Amino acid sequence: MNILLICSAGMSTSLLVTKMKKAAEEKGIEAEIWAVSTDAVDRNLPKADVALIGPQIRFQLKVLKEKGSKIGVPVDVIDSVDYGMCNGPKVLAKAMKMIEENK
């Protein structure tokens, strides 16, 4: 599965990506997880099965959901508590649930 995280600069989510990769590895889940800035969304969204956006860019959810729906990629906001705590397992579970619901 391919999980894309989107934030304003593409850097604040790097620790969360690391924690999500570790959680996936511990569960034996093969996942490609990466983070990009909003500038790189158009070239990265088509490669993803799901996209999660940082709470600090929640205001862009509608536009990003529209882009995702055109190509079959669900988009949602990462819970601000999970984001702030860098809760990789919880964010990974949310992404996996979204992929399952999109099948």
Image (cartoon, rainbow, N blue to C red):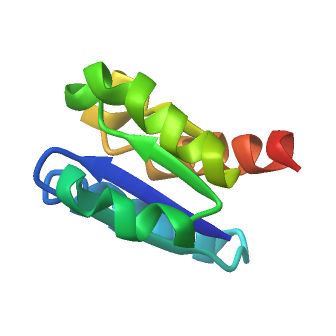
Tally the numbered discs: 0
Q: Residue at x 36, y 60 (%)?
A: 42
Q: Residue at x 65, y 61 (%)?
A: 49
Q: Percent position (x, y) of residue 81?
A: 35, 24
Q: Residue at x 47, y 61 (%)?
A: 45
Q: Residue at x 54, y 62 (%)?
A: 3
Q: Going by the image, does 11 lie left or right of 38?
A: left
Q: Nearer the viewer, residue 8 or 90?
A: 8
Figure quadrant of residue 58: top left
Q: Percent position (x, y) of residue 9?
A: 10, 53
Q: Percent position (x, y) of residue 62?
A: 43, 23
Q: Nearer the viewer, residue 5 or 84?
A: 5
| Residue 34 can be seen, yes or no | no
Q: Percent position (x, y) of residue 41?
A: 33, 57
Q: Going by the image, does 61 lie left or right of 68?
A: left
Quadrant the N terminus occupies: bottom right
Q: Nearer the viewer, residue 74 or 54?
A: 74
